[in-house]
């Protein structure tokens, strides 16, 4: 199951509420530290992808937020892209429904 496209509406609304309460601007240093924390092996394909994403968007505006499930969300408002990290469980690309929610939330910040 996708992390954010196949959830019931009630779960999405709960997630929206928590993300709205926790979202904040993030510095590049924070984002790099997040990557170091989650990628203990630098040859991990996700590590390479994440670092390339940060490098490509080094001057972009990023945000960090949490979800009720304990995931950390990193969102780039300039590109409309993002990733989620669920500690000890995995990570992935934020799908269109989640990106739309993040765009709406950050538009008001």
Image (cartoon, rainbow, N blue to C red):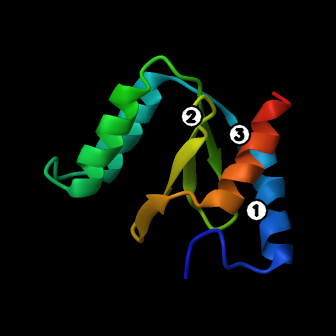
Residue labelled with disc 2: 79
Q: How far separated are the C-alphas under marks 1 and 3?
A: 12 Å
Q: How many callouts does the rendering have?
A: 3
Which quadrant of the view contains residue 76? top right
- Left or right: where does residue 85 sit relative to residue 53? right
Q: Which one is nearer the viewer's eye here, 26 or 55?
A: 55
Disc 3 crowd, CA 10 A, few/some/many (<14, 14-19, 20+): many
Which residue: 57% across, 49% down? 73
* Residue 15 numbered mark, or none: 1
Front-most of residues 24 and 46: 46
Tags 3 and 2 touching, CB below 8 Å: no
Estimate the x, y position of residue 30 in percent, counting from the top left: 45, 30
* Vertical order, 18 against 4 (above or below): above
User: Mark 1–mark 2 contact, CB under 8 Å?
Assistant: no
The span from disc 1 to disc 2 (Cα, nearest Å) is 22 Å
Where's the C terminus, which quadrant?
top right
Residue ID for mark 3: 23
Q: Residue 15: which quarter of the image?
A: bottom right
| Labels 1 and 3 touching (C-beta < 8 A) | no
């Amino acid at each position: 199951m996708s992390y954010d496209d196949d959830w019931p509406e009630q779960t999405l609304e709960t997630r929206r509420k928590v993300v709205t309460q926790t979202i904040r601007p993030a510095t590049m240093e924070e984002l790099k530290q997040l990557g170091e924390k989650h990628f203990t092996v630098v040859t991990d394909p996700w590590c390479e992808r994440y670092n390339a994403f940060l490098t490509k968007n080094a001057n972009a505006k990023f945000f960090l937020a949490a979800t009720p499930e304990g995931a950390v969300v990193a969102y780039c408002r300039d590109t409309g892209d993002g990733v989620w990290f669920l500690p000890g469980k995995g990570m992935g690309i934020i799908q269109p429904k989640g990106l739309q929610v993040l765009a709406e939330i950050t538009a008001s910040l």
